[in-house]
Image (cartoon, rainbow, N blue to C red):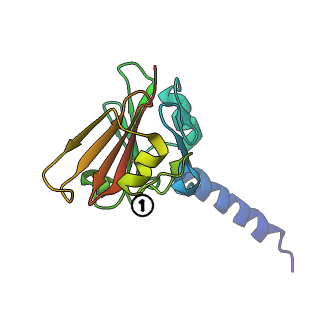
């Protein structure tokens, strides 16, 4: 039996389906497990001075975007641009944070010092020293922010554990 016509037809069908289907965002296969944060400098492949276009080239199209805010649901973070088109801030979220409904997975990366979502307040202070500023919101279960202005990082805590890491890139 001659399989050549079937092979040609199958190849054409696959090409048509592949060409007409929406390609998944690059970030569909990326995990935040391996993302290392260097406060004020980088969050994995994102770095200070990077344009939003360069970011999309690295991570793929975001799941949502509006007014300079790009949501990467599978990575557990939101990227915000400055008034130009430069990556300005990355908001890495853990489970239970107000923005967690934007994510399909929480952020699972960590700083180069090993501080990630779920780290204790004591671990943050041990890694970075005394913060520039702290703000509490009622009890520890309601929340606290620990700011390190010179580093460009804020740790948001709930129940004495990191629930979000906000990295601001130096301009």
Q: Nearer the viewer, residue 144 or 73?
A: 144
The residue beneath circle 1 is 105
Quadrant into which the N terminus falls: bottom right
Q: Residues within 10 Å of mark 1 (few under 14, many from 20)?
A: some
The image quadrant that residue 85 belongs to is: top left
Task: Find numbered disc 1 in the image and state the secondary structure of the residue it sits on.
Answer: loop
The x, y position of residue 83, in whole percent, is: 35, 20
The answer to whether residue 25 of the structure is visible from this angle is no
Quarter-of-image position of residue 119: bottom left
Q: Residue at x 53, y 51 (%)?
A: 27
Please tell me whether residue 108 is drawn above or below residue 79 in the rendered image: below
Q: Residue at x 46, y 53 (%)?
A: 116
The quarter of the picture where residue 132 lies is top left
Indicate whether 97 appears above or below 56.
below
Looking at this view, name the residue that lies furthest to the left: 138
Residue 7 makes an appearance in the image: yes
Above or below 139: residue 84: above
Q: Is residue 74 left or right of residue 102?
A: right
Estimate the x, y position of residue 4 in percent, counting from the top left. Answer: 83, 68
Is residue 20 shown left or right of residue 123?
Answer: right
Q: Nearer the viewer, residue 138 or 75?
A: 138
Q: Nearer the viewer, residue 10 or 102?
A: 102
Residue 133, position as x, y percentages in the image: 28, 34
Q: Horizontal placement of 67 versus 141: left or right? A: right
Residue located at (53% from left, 52% from top)? 114
Foreground pick, 73 / 106: 106
């Amino acid at each position: 039996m001659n399989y050549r016509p079937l092979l040609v037809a199958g190849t054409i069908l696959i090409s048509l389906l592949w060409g007409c289907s929406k390609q998944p965002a690059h970030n569909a296969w990326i995990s935040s497990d391996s993302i290392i944060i260097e406060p004020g400098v980088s969050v994995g492949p994102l770095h200070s001075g990077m344009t939003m276009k360069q970011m999309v080239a690295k991570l793929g199209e975001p799941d949502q975007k509006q007014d300079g805010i790009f949501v990467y649901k599978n990575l557990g973070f939101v990227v915000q641009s400055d008034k130009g088109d430069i990556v300005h801030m990355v908001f890495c979220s853990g489970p239970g944070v107000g923005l967690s409904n934007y994510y399909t997975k929480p952020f699972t990366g960590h700083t180069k010092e090993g501080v990630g979502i779920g780290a204790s307040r004591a671990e943050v202070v041990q890694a970075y020293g005394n913060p520039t500023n702290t703000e509490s919101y009622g009890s520890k279960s309601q929340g606290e922010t620990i700011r390190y202005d010179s580093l460009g990082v804020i740790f948001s805590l709930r129940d004495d554990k990191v629930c979000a890491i906000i990295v601001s890139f130096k301009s």
